[in-house]
Amino acid sequence: MTCVAQLSAPWREPAEVLSAFAGEPWALGLVTGGPDARWSYVARAPAATFTHHAGDAGEPFARLRDLLGPASPGATEGPPFQGGVVGLAAYELGDHVEALGLPRQGAWPDLAAARYDVLLAFDHQARIVVAVGRAGDHDAAQARARAALAWMDAAPLAPRGGVLAGPLQASDPAAYEAAVAQVVARIRAGEIFQANIARAWTGALAPGAQPFDLFARLLDQSAAPFAAYLRLPGLALVSNSPERFLQVRDGRVETKPIKGTRPRGEGPAADAALAAELLASDKDRAENLMIVDLMRNDLARVCAPGSVKVPSLWALESFANVHHLVSTVTGALSPGRDALDLLVAAFPPGSITGAPKVQAMKVIAGLETPRGPYCGSLFWAGADGEFDSSVLIRTAACVETPGGWRVEARAGAGIVEGSDPLAERLETEAKIAALAKALTEAPRA
């Protein structure tokens, strides 16, 4: 039997609290932004961790299940995440779902996971902070919750001003357009229907700058629904993703694939025109529909027959730099199935692979260097069986070197038969714009 204790405290901004220990290994921030923002989380000092690299002993999904342990009920009130496992699944974790022999990217593991029995949950609507402690008895759980509250006593770091990185080096635009043209030709030949092809931007953080500075800057400029920070030994993930991958609530499943993009316009009239153009685009709607069908198929592997539905198709969602078409697919887990079964059934996300998924992944592997965290997922798996996760787009992968932090970010586009190589390249530049701005421009006073 596991007990869950919760203690409340006055509101503090999650990033402000996290800043005091953001340099610790396994420091974690899951911050939600936007008008419907509700819960954010900060955690540190996990009870247990593991990283799984290609060639390591054991099977990563089995190790993940062992780390999470048997399901135990949470408190009936309080945040959705009341302790459990947080995991960083790199794109190449998909090699353990379908053996494709994918190459790997440097120091990044296929899967890094930690079990947090203590955390702070930030209720943006009630404007309170809830400290959560899990333990085998009530007194120990209370002690852990009090320990989490004490994290808020640490002095926060002041936001860093100035430019965080020098100019970013973009991968060759002509090579990207050639790759798009090749994919279009392969689609016309009947090999695939769609593939998401990305390009990279690389650079170095300025002397003294840290990955957390980028995270704080992105939150200040425009926090996305799935903003996240995870510090690993020698590595750091900074994400400002707008896209949900998989969610499980009381056995109900939801995924919200994004396909279809336009940049934001200069002024209300131009912005509205671009949004209307996206909504009316047959090409973008077809691209979105293909991925909806793929996600319906992935969910159906572990959901009850007849339960998979599409309650929302081609909804417009607008963010700081782009408009997106977003669809919603839902289902109900079959008896005996859980969130980790769902993760295996659907990984990697369909919106950033293509259709058919396995062949699209083969095409991607032939045209891109290993993706690492990009287009993987950051997820939490609650000890009570609840689950939520993001698609790691709008994400920077940071690697510590003797000379300082190196950073890589990527942006991609879904290529279909009607794709224009130049238009797809420009779409990648619209998608990377907010992240590039946070790195290479000083904030306005």
Image (cartoon, grey):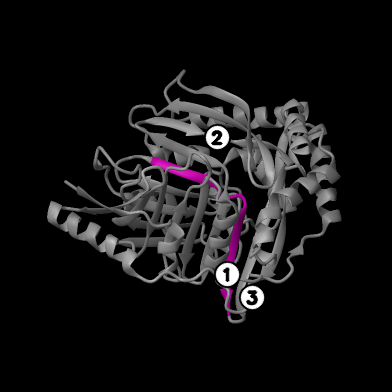
Q: Which residues are magenta?
A: 387-401
Residue 124 or 83: which is nearer the viewer?
A: 124
Specify the farthest residue to the front.
445
Residue 222 percent across, percent down from the top left: 59, 51
Tags 1 and 2 in contact by the CB under 8 Å rule?
no
Magenta span: helix, strand or loop, mainly?
strand
Residue 250 is drawn in which quadrant? top left
Specify the farthest residue to the top.
306
Tags 2 and 3 in contact by the CB under 8 Å rule?
no
Q: Label 3 to label 1, Cα distance in Å?
A: 13 Å
Q: Three-letter amino acid code at disc 2?
A: Lys
- Which residue sits at x=55%, y=29%? 328
Q: Is residue 300 visible?
A: no
- Secondary structure state at the residue bearing disc 2: loop
Can you identify the residue that label 1 sits on? 399
* Mark 3 or mark 1, earlier in chain: 3
- Secondary structure state at the residue bearing disc 1: strand
* Mark 1 or mark 2, earlier in chain: 2
Residue 237 or 213: which is nearer the viewer?
A: 213
Residue 326 percent across, percent down from the top left: 61, 33
Can you identify the residue that label 3 sits on? 206
Camera-near label (3 vs 1) is 3
Mark 1 residue crowding within 10 angstroms, few (<14) / some (14–19) / many (20+) = many
Q: Three-letter amino acid code at disc 1?
A: Val
* Mark 2 or mark 3, earlier in chain: 3
Residue 139 percent across, percent down from the top left: 13, 56
350 magenta-colored: no
Q: Residue 256 shows which numbered tag?
A: 2
- Secondary structure state at the residue bearing disc 3: loop
